[in-house]
Amino acid sequence: MDWITHAAVGAALGELVFGKRLGNRALGWGLLLGIFPDLLDALLALFLTTSGRLAQVSAASHSPLVMLALLLVLPRSSAKLWRQAKVTRAQAGGFLALAWGVHLLVDALSLPGVQVLWPYPGPRVGIWLLDRGDGLFALPMGVMLLSLVWLRSKKEQAKRRRRWGWGVGLSGGYLVLAGVAKWAAAAGFSEDLARRGITCERRMESPFSCNLLLWRGMAECGDDVWVGYRSVFEWRSTALRWTVFPRQRQTFATVADDPNAKRVAAFAGGWWIARPNKSGVWLADLRGGECLQWGERKGMVDIRLRHAWQLDSQSQGDPLHPILADPKNRSEFLHRLLQRSLGENDGWQATPRLAGVPGAFPELLRVVE
């Protein structure tokens, strides 16, 4: 869905800039340029280790330095193509820069953000407004742009513009709703922590599983990370239930000098947790969300983090191995998710356990209510 989103946004940009002159070719060029940075990421990933791929997600391929280099190369190398379409080199370069910049803006709306200062190892830039690959954002734009393919004559140009406007307008409206929902959720999380007298080093909010009705908040409190959920239908005064994840900094300290661990910590933006096991250290990025499984033990819910890795520094080859969270009983999860999104807690709350750590029993987690 992430690629489809960028393809739709790029095609919309192509239609806006060159649609009247080039018709459907403008959609195709915009689509290609919309996914071009991710194509570079995919090609680069073929030659990198797991931690190397984490370090390069939305980094080198999304860097303004790389964009400037391509601005010098691509318009010249494809000059014949642009000349046939009666587009100047300056116009081609401007369109390339615009498409690249819009791609960065879209990636900055979701995790893990964009490392715009690459190759300088600075923090990633992002506002966590959407879940990565949120199909509801791209759907109206994509449907409307697809319908333009059959509107080719000059008499149908006005209809093309109207449909373009509807598609972009509906997708833009979705972003506005996301911004309002994030603002309301952030205010609720902040008020709940203040009411408890909790001072946190930092805090963040993100939508839960492409769902603007339910938001997931995290607060860093010393060596713990508090994770809670808030529906947009709940009042600010509604008390929240927080699940506390101990970081275990002492565990991470055992691998802190390993470059693979450093890359995981950088990718996670510091929102990592670590657990020791017989074969090494398990690491996870709390920002990536979780798979929830109720009923493994009566009255309990197992939490498996979506972004997790096993680091075995003594293994041959790539020492970092992704651990996939396998969701079970999707229908039950969707039913409980719908109830929680509407503000009902009964089917959601249970005693939490951290599961999915290789070679370890599920770990009971503390709850603050």
Image: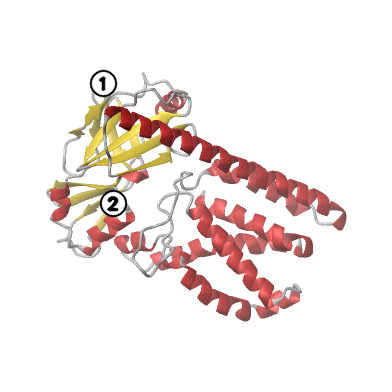
Q: Going by the picture, which residue comes out furthest to the right?
A: 155
Task: Choose between 40 and 188: the one closer to the eye.
Answer: 188
Q: Position of residue 309 (x, y in %)?
A: 26, 51
Q: Which residue is mark 2?
A: 270
| Figure check: 158 above or below 332 | below
Q: Give left or right: position of 124 versus 100.
A: left
Q: Give left or right: position of 253 versus 109.
A: left
Q: The C terminus is located in which quarter?
A: top left
Q: Residues within 10 Å of mark 2 (few under 14, many from 20)?
A: some
Give the residue displayed 25% in from the left and 63% down from the top.
318
Give the residue displayed 71% in from the left and 76% down from the top.
88
The amino acid type, in three-letter code, at marker 2 is Gly
Task: Choose between 29 and 245: the one closer to the eye.
Answer: 245
The amino acid type, in three-letter code, at marker 1 is Gly
* Distance in Å between CA atoms under marks 1 and 2: 32 Å
Q: Give left or right: position of 146 versus 6.
A: right
Q: The residue tagged with tag 1: helix, strand or loop?
A: loop
Q: Position of residue 361 (x, y in %)?
A: 16, 36
Residue 299, disc: 1
